[in-house]
Image: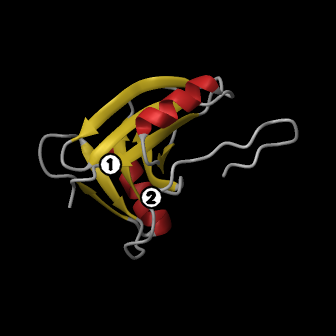
Amino acid sequence: MITRTTGQPEEEIKPGVTPKIVWFEVPAEDVERAKYFYATLFGWKIEKFPGDLQYWHIDTGGGDNSLDGGMIKRHHPDKCITNYIAVSSIDDYVTRIKDLGGQIMVPKSSVQGMGYFALCKDTEGNTFGLWEMDKNAK
């Protein structure tokens, strides 16, 4: 259950996935410069994903339970680091976000063979992502 502040009702979250941050994405004006910065500062390994997609995997060095991320060329000057939160159903959360006064910036989109994401804004203008694992992904 989600506990609300006084005067707000408690709401049930569907069982299955505990909403938590599972991925982060770092936009960069100059990807090589940003790779050097984060690799040197934290010792992270940053390697391009295979294929034509201009996207780099950030391995933070922990085990399978540690949070990793991605790096992408910044396409908008106001783009900031985005955290992705795992949810059981993006469709259900999109409805809840709208009901609570948030916005959907990028609707549910597929990442082939992995899952789905959506980009949202909270009531304060902060961007965050939702991530739903493809139940058929291995």
Q: Amino acid at mark 2?
A: Tyr
Residue 4: horizontal and vertical position, in percent?
77, 43
Q: Relative to residue 100, is residue 55 drawn left or right?
A: left
Tag 1, which secondary structure? helix
Q: Residue at x 73, y 43 (%)?
A: 10
* Label 1 – label 2 distance at C-alpha: 10 Å
Mark 1 vs mark 2: which is more N-terminal?
A: 1
Q: Amino acid at mark 1?
A: Glu
Residue nearest the viewer, comparing 69 with 134: 134
Q: Is residue 29 visible?
A: no
Residue nearest the viewer, comparing 106 with 11: 11
> In the image, which disc is placed on residue 32?
1
Tag 2, which secondary structure? helix
Q: Is residue 44 visible?
A: yes
Residue that numbered label 2 is attached to? 38
Q: Residues within 10 Å of mark 2 (few under 14, many from 20)?
A: some
Number of callouts in the render? 2
Q: Residues within 10 Å of mark 1 (few under 14, many from 20)?
A: few
Q: Residue at x 40, y 26 (%)?
A: 106
Q: Residue at x 43, y 70 (%)?
A: 43
Residue 125: horizontal and vertical position, in percent?
63, 27
Q: Relative to residue 82, is residue 70 drawn left or right?
A: left
